[in-house]
Image (spheres, grey):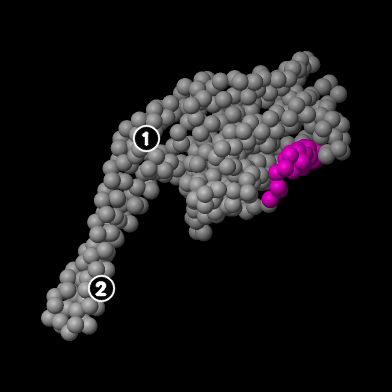
Amino acid sequence: MLQVAFIRENRETVLKGLAKRNFKNAVEMVDKTILADEERRAIQTELDAILAESNKLSKDIGDLFKSGETQKVAILKEKTVLLKDKSKELTENLQQKANELQELLYLIPNIPNEIVPEGISAEDNLNVFQEGEIPKLHEGAMPHWELAKKYDIIDFELGNKISGAGFPVYKGKGAKLQRALINYFLDKNTAAGYDEVQVPHLVNEASGFGTGQLPDKEGQMYHDATDNLYLIPTAEVPVTNIYRDVILKETEFPICKTAYTPCFRREAGSYGAHVRGLNRLHQFDKVEIVRIEHPSNSYAALNLMVNHVKGILQELKLPYRILRLCGGDMGFTSALTYDFEVFSTAQDRWLEISSVSNFETFQANRLKLRFKNSEGKSELAHTLNGSSLALPRVLAGLLENCQTPEGIKIPDALIPYCGFEYIN
């Protein structure tokens, strides 16, 4: 979340950034936040004055006791009782106002980086890079959901029987290819210097607030009300929360982690060809990369992450493009996001397969993730994360773009991982 001091001291900058996001009620939200902060600070000032007066009275009472002036002691004790009652009242008011301020801050999104383009939807995103030749498919080429049925590698109907729509069952070579992709992505990430971790698939409320999924995406997350735990929508949540309430040493940067997890999202509820098959699921597999960086290096790190994902897609020989998201299409916590999309020739459309983002201090402020700088002062770190990669649409792109009359040709980079060259 944004720091309240930054909002107070840079009101116009904040409003300009929120306008780029097309954030509704920006002026009202910002002014309510500034007012709540002023009221909190006024209460704090009054409380500090009363506590200082109480401390002085305690010292005076001690001196009077020593001098035997008991009558004056009684008078001062009456004052201390009144001050104690007032102090208690102000402490309660201060906590209430601090909670109110915190709730307001939770509702204000991050400020976009200056290079984020203007726009209100995906149509306004900026294509900054494109690579790979779009294959010309043979006559009778199919979309992946028909290929899955033809070769009996993914069963959507069986998944619907077991759980419901959006929960596919991978079978035979489909399951092996899925596992091969996970291992391939993890190996590529660890070779690039990311330490692999295995993390819980359920997180507590504090973790959800820490990375910004709560309260922004509460309705999109599966929630176990009994234990108040949330199924993770991405490994970003548990991996980044490893560093919640941590003070790092400057020499520990950069921190680079990778993790494979299943991901769970309730958002898959629409219908049509654009969400058929693997295009949108309630449960899917993803390999994530997360970085904790010194503020001076976070944008160089973002470029490294983008180039890393590019390298994987080049090895898989998938045609792809990179979009710089406009203000209206960015995630709540992001300062700058690049989306990767693979072209599906069979569907004649681009499929999003990765988002790589810099959150600057937005998550770190929620997480209380700090480091000691060279002067010994605490600063907020910068956090970044990216998909490397999300499997469903990568798999969809592979099945569709690599299909031949003889079957689906496995990319050379994956053959050592899955043990076969064709699905036929």
User: Where 353 falls versus 123 (above or below)?
Assistant: below
Identify the residue under disc 2. Answer: 59
Q: Amino acid at mark 2?
A: Lys
State the SS at label 2: helix
Q: Is residue 196 magenta?
A: yes
Q: Can you tell which mark lies on residue 359?
A: none
What residue is drawn where x is 70% and y is 33%? 308
State the SS at label 1: loop
What residue is drawn where x is 54% and y is 31%? 336
Q: Quadrant of residue 138?
A: top right
Identify the residue under disc 1. Answer: 10
Q: Specify whether 299 is left or right of 1.
A: right
- Magenta-highlighted stretch: main secondary structure? helix
> What is the x, y in percent for residue 369?
52, 50
Residue 238 in view (yes/no): no
What residue is drawn where x is 43% and y is 26%? 20
Viewer-proximal residue among 281 and 238 = 238
Q: CA distance from mark 2 to mark 1?
A: 43 Å
> What is the x, y in percent for residue 53?
23, 65
Give the quarter of the figure containing the C terminus: top right
**Range of the magenta residues?**
170-197
Q: Specify whether 421 is left or right of 168.
A: right
What residue is drawn where x is 50% and y is 59%? 226
Q: How many numbered marks, from 0 up?
A: 2
Q: Specify whether 362 is left or right of 255.
A: left
Q: Amino acid at mark 1?
A: Asn
Viewer-proximal residue among 281 and 385 = 385
Residue 20 in view (yes/no): yes
Neighbour tally class for label 1: few under 14, some 14-19, many 20 plus, Cα within 10 Å: few
User: Where 294 falls versus 64 (above or below)?
Assistant: above
> What is the x, y in percent for residue 139?
78, 15
